[in-house]
Image: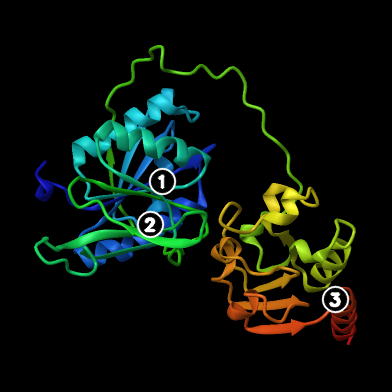
């Protein structure tokens, strides 16, 4: 493999029902940082049916080029045709880096593509940067420059691993939604748009979709919330979440929770913050009865302001909190809620 042939940062621009997923825009933003370090460009790979019109949105968020793979076989996501599409783009254009969102689609697509093109894949990355590998020079071993250093939690979140793929290209990573930040939208920006179609011949690997049934969810996506009131095991019971809901209502926020709460059956999985839940970046995050295990911190430590309420003054959550209150949440939350109500009423 001639590594010098591989240039550019490619982002899989996931779309569902002809709407660009937020993770695609976040990855383009991060891709620009990486591309600037490598003195190259960011290319968005848009796969679907009748999706060319979405190219302008990708350009507005920073894509320098958009490769459109448009075919009726790509109308709904199916593993085989999408894998064929993305792998064909990679084999033809030879990117140095490929980024995929760690969504339900991305977690299915990424590993299959990496296996097909014979390269590595680092999953669920929380940090991406260009640097030297090995990071610390090892006597007798060549230190390679301008490598993609992919950082992710390992061993259940108890340690952090930095992984590189120095011998093969492209360097591939999946990134969880909410970890990276998208660039400000600039509608005046335009991208070079290229159409590419490797041809699709359905075979026994093509799943036939008989029906698509969409679930209707009334809850707000916690990843979009600006204010979150999050509860952990220390809340004590499902009934006690009424205290958090009252506070969230006054603040105009949303209730979320830790994994322990989901495991106990008090709240649904779509409200879970953390390594096995969602990554959030609200303006204000209340951590109520949450000890602060590293798995939870991985999902919320980038919040602008963190307020911790816990009766255990040694809880790790206080290490990342901007403000901490040590005490009984059953007394503190009602007092806080009433005080805020009074302020709002003035």
Alpha carbon of mark 2 to alpha carbon of mark 1: how far? 8 Å
Whichever of callouts 2 and 3 sits on the residue coming sooner in the sequence is: 2
At horizontal 9% and vertical 44% (from top left) the residue drawn is 2
Whichever of callouts 2 and 1 sits on the residue coming sooner in the sequence is: 1
Image quadrant containing the N terminus: top left
Regarding mark 1 in the picture, which secondary structure is present there? loop
Residue 270 in the image: state x and y as whole percent: 68, 49
Regarding mark 2 in the picture, which secondary structure is present there? helix
Q: Residue under circle 1? A: 13
Alpha carbon of mark 2 to alpha carbon of mark 3: how far? 40 Å
Q: Which residue appears farthest toward the front when viewing the image?
A: 139
**Residue 130 is drawn in which quadrant?**
bottom left
Q: Residue under circle 2? A: 28
Q: Residue under circle 3? A: 333
Residue 266 numbered tag: none
Image quadrant containing the C terminus: bottom right
Q: Seen in the image, is 28 located left or right of residue 146?
A: right
Q: Seen in the image, is 3 located left or right of residue 312?
A: left
Mark 1, other Cα within 10 Å: few <14 / some 14–19 / many ≥20: many
Q: Seen in the image, is 196 located left or right of residue 341?
A: left
At horizontal 57% and vertical 59% (from top left) the residue drawn is 279
Choose mark 2 or mark 3, whichever is in front: 3
């Amino acid at each position: 493999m001639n590594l010098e042939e591989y240039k550019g940062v490619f982002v899989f621009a996931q779309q569902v029902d002809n709407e660009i997923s937020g993770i695609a825009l976040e990855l383009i933003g991060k891709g620009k940082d990486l591309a600037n370090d490598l003195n190259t460009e960011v290319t968005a790979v848009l796969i679907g049916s009748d999706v060319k019109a979405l190219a302008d949105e990708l350009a507005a968020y920073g894509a320098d080029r958009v490769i459109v793979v448009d075919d009726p076989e790509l109308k709904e996501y199916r593993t085989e045709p999408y894998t064929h599409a993305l792998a064909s783009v990679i084999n033809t254009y030879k990117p140095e880096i490929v980024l995929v969102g760690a969504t339900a689609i991305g977690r299915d697509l990424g590993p299959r593509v990496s296996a097909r093109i014979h390269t590595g894949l680092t999953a669920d990355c929380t940090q991406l940067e260009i640097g030297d590998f090995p990071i610390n020079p090892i006597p007798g071993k060549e230190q390679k420059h301008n490598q993609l250093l992919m950082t992710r939690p390992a061993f259940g979140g108890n340690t952090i691993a930095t992984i590189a793929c120095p011998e093969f290209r492209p360097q591939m990573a999946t990134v969880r939604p909410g970890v990276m930040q998208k660039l400000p939208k600039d509608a005046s920006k335009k991208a070079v748009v290229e159409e590419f179609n490797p041809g699709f011949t359905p075979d026994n690997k093509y799943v036939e979709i008989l029906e698509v049934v969409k679930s209707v969810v009334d809850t707000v996506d916690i990843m979009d919330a600006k204010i979150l009131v999050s509860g952990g095991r220390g809340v004590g019971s499902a009934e006690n979440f009424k205290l958090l809901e009252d506070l969230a209502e006054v603040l105009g926020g949303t209730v979320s929770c830790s994994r322990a709460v989901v495991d106990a059956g008090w709240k649904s999985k779509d409200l879970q913050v953390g390594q096995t839940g969602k990554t959030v970046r609200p303006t204000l995050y209340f951590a109520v009865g949450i000890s602060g295990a590293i798995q939870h911190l991985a999902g919320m430590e980038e919040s602008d302001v963190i307020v911790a309420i816990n009766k255990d003054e040694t809880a790790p959550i206080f290490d990342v909190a901007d403000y901490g209150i040590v005490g009984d949440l059953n007394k503190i939350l009602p007092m806080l809620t009433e005080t805020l109500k009074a302020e709002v009423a003035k």
